[in-house]
Image (cartoon, coloured by chain):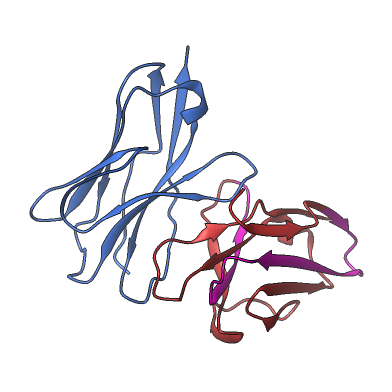
């Protein structure tokens, strides 16, 4: 599976929008882009997934440019409870999930 | 609550002990997974089961022995572990091995002394 690169950490204040960009220059045609969220001492939780363009759900939005070499997870109006590690993953038709180091997002009042 | 339940939540064991971790899901999923998460390291996929058959074993030492008696239950049998095996062990399930949305349990925090 192609590798992903994302920032190690990001800090934000409550009520702000947080955008986490993930690079995946070697993404394959069959790869989907999937984001997970993990709180301390808990298992990761699926947030959103996309193949191209924009995907939005009740939690976040995912922006994918035409070349698909990067993607941006957008968390609108974050709260303290959004403090977590966010993982960007590529998964092919076999569904194999390979987690990287993730981005630690810290939201402060 | 994800629908995937792991027990125990915490476990302390000596290096000569034998213990088992249990995972249970009633989501009707056909695929189940064991992951290991060590401090400051990414999640490592250990084992994958599809319809009770092991389909992947990522070079995991034999002191970790998985068992999947049915599609709802997954065990990880532990014996003669090392202190470096201390980690958070996470179980997950998905509708099938081709699914990219996995549901994770809360994990078992294992400490080997």
In the rendered view, would you say A66 is above or below B96? above
Query: What x and y, as percent, mark residue A109?
Result: 47, 11
In the rendered view, would you say A73 is above or below B11? above
Q: Point out the image quarter for the N terminus of chain A.
A: bottom left
A37 horizontally vs B51: left or right? left
Q: Main secondary structure of the magenta part?
A: strand
Q: Colour of chain B?
A: red
Observer-nearest of B95 and B13 = B95
Q: Residue at x 57, y 46 (%)?
A: B40
Query: What x and y, as percent, mark residue B79?
Result: 83, 74
Residue situated furthest bottom in the rendering: B53
Q: Residue at x 91, y 69 (%)?
A: B17
Observer-nearest of B84 and B20 = B20
Residue situated furthest left in the rendering: A66
Q: Colour of chain A?
A: blue
Count of all numbered marks drawn on residues in the image:
0
Query: What x and y, as percent, mark residue A37?
Result: 46, 44
Q: Residue at x 38, y 71 (%)?
A: A95
In the rendered view, would you say B70 is above or below B89? below
Q: Residue at x 63, y 56 (%)?
A: B105
The magenta stretch spans residue B72: no
Query: What x and y, as percent, mark residue A7?
Result: 34, 39
Magenta-drawn segment: B11-39
């Amino acid at each position: 599976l192609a590798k992903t690169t994302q920032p190690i950490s990001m800090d934000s204040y409550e009520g702000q929008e947080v955008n986490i960009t993930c690079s995946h220059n070697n993404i394959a045609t069959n790869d989907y882009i999937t984001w997970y969220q993990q709180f301390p001492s808990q298992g990761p939780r699926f947030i959103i997934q996309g193949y191209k363009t924009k995907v939005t759900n009740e939690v976040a939005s995912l922006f994918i440019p035409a070349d698909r070499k990067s993607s941006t997870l957008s968390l609108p109006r974050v709260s303290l409870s959004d403090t977590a590690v966010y993982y960007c993953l590529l998964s092919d038709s076999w569904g194999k999930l390979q987690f990287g180091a993730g981005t630690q997002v810290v939201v402060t009042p | 609550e994800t629908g995937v339940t792991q027990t125990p939540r915490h476990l302390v064991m000596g290096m000569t002990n034998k213990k088992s971790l249990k995972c249970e899901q009633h989501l009707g999923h056909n695929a189940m997974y064991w992951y290991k998460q060590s401090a400051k390291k990414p999640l490592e996929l250990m084992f994958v089961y599809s319809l009770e058959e092991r389909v992947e074993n990522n070079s995991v030492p034999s002191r970790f022995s998985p068992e999947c008696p049915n599609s709802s239950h997954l065990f990880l049998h532990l014996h003669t572990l090392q202190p470096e095996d201390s980690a958070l062990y996470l179980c997950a399930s998905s509708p099938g091995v081709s699914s990219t949305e996995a549901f994770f349990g809360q994990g078992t925090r294992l400490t080997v002394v």
